[in-house]
């Protein structure tokens, strides 16, 4: 472990695992790195100190042209079911510098995304374009402000090099912070190697890192699977609280830690519809809004398959244990989702008819093409959403609030804490990205980020960020950007 005047404290435990799980490789230097965005609050919370460095030196460091002391850069190997089809993958354009320990000994990965070719690049160039990296910065920081578990973005660095996609675009590197980058696909990769000691070592490592309370239990694999399932149930219900659609929930994009990871063709709903799809590559709606919990359960099934040899020595017994755990996800998620929806409606107590009340509202919203965010925000002020068919529901909801075992003030506080006033609306994100990528104008990005840092505040001057898109502004498809 190394400590420098920049306060780096690296302790690279993943690099001490068997080398079948990664490849040691350094980032490929870029021509002319320059600092585009630096997340100073995150810098501070990590206990890093760049005060002795100028922007050029910071850019050289965070682009990977120079390495911080104690870094042991690696590219991680993993597999993944991509739209239901299994592939052997790996970090094709990302390099993990190492694991930094914060002042309170929290362990976080420091990863460079877009840092060049690796053994897992599969013919790709290993680079990233500025637009998608800014997009991940904006969305991940918005998710953090919304109090939803997520990877974070420390910086975006322009590389000074072009990236060739459908057009020529400016290149960039994202510095991503994560509790870890261990995925369901990591376990699938280890299982494919048919090396039981390696699989067991990965399980024990991931358990100690993310679920230390499970260490030494009678069936570590079963308890681990259940713990991962619980976090995923909570995460998906939180996504649905704010109308978030991940867009590409492959098993390599499901983090064991329970953090949201890989912001490719993701989006937030404007008009509510349960079947909403944005991803340009999701041709059949596999990852639509109302399918996300089912896909999380499917992904957990793949994790259970990978862990079968560790669930029980007898394969039939192992399958029964795994199936029972995967079936239990439905009840986990439904309980989390119902509790979440009650909070959005300010309901502290529980009544059997609450589920019917919720579904009635969603049906009205879908039929009348109501804005998801603003409908919940304006429920205490129905005059702001003057839809005649909503009034009978408002009357029933207000009667329900009178039986709520809480004051109206407490109910309104609960609603305010769970219903954001602003989200990163797709058209505003795209406008900011185009201004940055095409015109080199970062002002719209900075303005958007400033508003998104306080998503639950109804602030004067933010009205344009709360306004749904006009038809001419509406974004119907989002793209992966890889």
Image: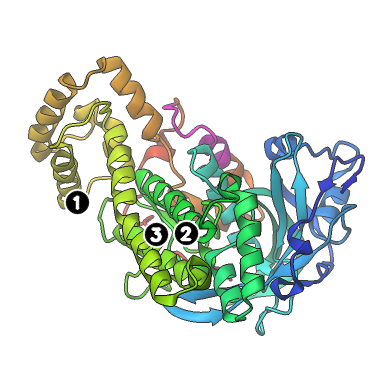
Label 2: which secondary element:
helix
- Sequence-wise first label, 2 or 3: 2
Label 1: which secondary element:
helix
Report the residue at 77% width, 48% height from top: 100
Q: To which residue does mark 1 refer?
A: 366
Q: CA distance from mark 1 to mark 2?
A: 39 Å
Report the residue at 57% width, 36% height from top: 450
Front in this rendered view, residue 423 or 1: 1
How far across and down, in percent of the image, does residue 222 sit?
47, 59
Residue 482 is left or right of residue 16, and the answer is left
Q: To which residue does mark 2 refer?
A: 222
Residue 90: in sight, yes or no? no
Q: CA distance from mark 3 to mark 1?
A: 18 Å
Report the residue at 40% width, 33% height from top: 463
Quadrant assignment for the C terminus? bottom right
User: Is the residue under label 3 in contact with that under label 2 (CB below 8 Å)?
Assistant: no
Q: CA distance from mark 2 to mark 3?
A: 42 Å
Magenta range: 447-458
Report the mark closest to the observer, 2 or 3: 2
Report the mark closest to the observer, 3 or 1: 1
How far across and down, in percent of the image, does residue 336 sit?
34, 43
Q: Can you tell which mark lies on residue 475? A: 3
């Amino acid at each position: 472990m190394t400590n420098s005047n920049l306060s780096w404290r690296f302790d690279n435990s993943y690099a001490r695992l068997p080398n079948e799980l990664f490849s040691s490789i350094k980032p490929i230097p870029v021509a002319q790195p320059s600092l585009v965005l630096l997340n100073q609050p995150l810098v501070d919370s990590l206990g890093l100190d760049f005060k002795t460095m100028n922007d050029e030196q910071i850019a050289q460091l965070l682009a990977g042209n120079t390495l911080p002391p104690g870094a042991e850069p690696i590219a991680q190997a993993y597999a993944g079911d991509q739209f239901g089809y299994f592939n052997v993958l790996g970090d094709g354009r990302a390099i993990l510098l190492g694991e930094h320990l914060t002042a309170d000994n929290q362990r976080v990965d420091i990863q460079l995304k877009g840092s060049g070719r690796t053994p897992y690049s599969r013919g790709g160039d290993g680079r990233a374009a500025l637009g998608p990296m800014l997009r991940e910065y904006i969305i991940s920081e918005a998710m953090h402000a919304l109090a939803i578990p997520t990877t974070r973005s420390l910086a975006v660095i322009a590389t000074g090099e072009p990236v060739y996609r459908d057009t020529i675009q400016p290149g960039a590197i994202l510095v991503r912070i994560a509790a870890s980058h261990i995925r369901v696909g990591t376990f699938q990769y280890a299982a494919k190697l048919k090396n039981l000691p390696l699989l067991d070592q990965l399980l024990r490592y991931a358990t100690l890192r993310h679920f230390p309370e499970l260490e030494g239990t009678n069936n570590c694999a079963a308890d681990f699977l259940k713990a991962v399932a619980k976090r995923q149930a909570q995460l998906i219900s939180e996504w649905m609280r704010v109308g978030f659609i991940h867009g590409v929930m492959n098993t390599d994009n499901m983090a064991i830690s329970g953090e949201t990871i890989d912001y490719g063709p993701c989006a937030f709903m404007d008009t509510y519809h349960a079947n909403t799809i944005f991803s340009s590559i999701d041709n059949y709606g596999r990852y639509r809004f109302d399918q996300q919990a089912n896909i999380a359960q499917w992904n957990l099934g793949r994790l259970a398959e990978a862990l079968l040899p560790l669930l029980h020595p007898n394969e039939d017994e192992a399958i029964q244990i795994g199936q029972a755990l995967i079936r239990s996800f439905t009840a986990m998620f439904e309980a989390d989702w119902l509790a979440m929806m009650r909070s959005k409606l300010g309901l502290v107590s529980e009544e059997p008819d609450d589920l019917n009340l919720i579904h009635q509202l969603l049906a009205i919203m879908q039929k009348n093409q109501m804005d998801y965010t603003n409908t919940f925000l304006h429920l205490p002020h129905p005059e702001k959403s003057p839809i005649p068919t909503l009034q009978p529901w408002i009357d029933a909801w207000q009667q329900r609030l009178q039986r709520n075992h809480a004051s109206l003030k407490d109910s309104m506080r609960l609603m305010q804490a769970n219903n954001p006033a602003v989200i990163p609306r797709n058209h505003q994100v795209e406008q900011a990205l185009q201004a940055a990528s095409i015109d080199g104008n970062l002002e719209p990005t900075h303005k958007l980020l400033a508003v998104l840092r306080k998503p639950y505040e109804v602030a004067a001057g933010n009205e344009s960020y709360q306004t749904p898109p006009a038809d001419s502004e509406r974004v119907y498809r989002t793209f992966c950007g890889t």
